[in-house]
Image (tube, rainbow, N blue to C red):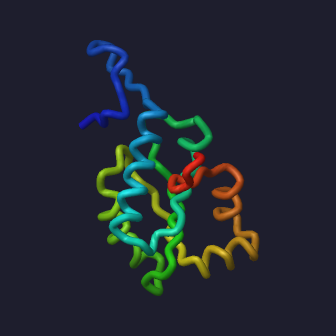
Amino acid sequence: MRSSSQRSSSDSAGATYLRKEEALTRLRAVAREARRRDPRLLRVILFGSLAKARATPRSDADLVIVLREGAPRRMDRIPALLDLFRESPLPLDLHPYTLEEWEGSLARKEPLPLLACREGMDLLAEGE
């Protein structure tokens, strides 16, 4: 099924284009609704190809999700987060952190958090 964030170039060509601005608008709305439903959400940072304008119709949305608190293992947080973000216009690649883990990862200069901070956009920030 084609997302409404994508469109075909024509019915015969079969090429599909990603409507980046529409996808970003919808992702921001989904992130805000997720925070409304779960106030533990502090940040939702989009990074990767969509944030860097290199996305294709096959791209997913790479998201760092920073929570006040969460299950001890990151992988155990993912099912509930997928439920919160079920209205996403794109497939998701989730990277959940508690605030303590996030700050520690940044202090240790771990690559993924540094990349997300350098090139990412916080979908919950008002000015983004």
- Above or below residue 32? Residue 52 is above
Percent across and percent down for residue 110 are 70, 69
Residue at 44% in and 41% down: 25
Residue 106 lies in quadrant: bottom right
x, y percentage for residue 3? 31, 36
For the point 45% across and 81% down, the residue is 70
Q: Is residue 54 above or below residue 100?
A: above
Q: Quadrant of the N terminus?
A: top left
| Residue at 48% over, 82% down | 69
Give the image quarter of residue 34: bottom left
Q: Residue at x 35, y 25 (%)?
A: 7
Taking 7 as reference, is 114 left or right? right
Place of residue 68 in the rendered image (x, y in percent of width and height, measured from the top left)? 51, 78
On screen, 80 above or below 7?
below
Q: In the image shown, does 59 or 33 lie closer to the viewer?
A: 33
Q: Nearer the viewer, residue 20 or 95?
A: 20
Residue reaching furthest to the bottom: 72
- Residue 44 position (above or below residue 48): below
For this orientation, the residue located farthest to the front is 126
Counting labels gives 0
Q: Residue furthest left?
A: 1
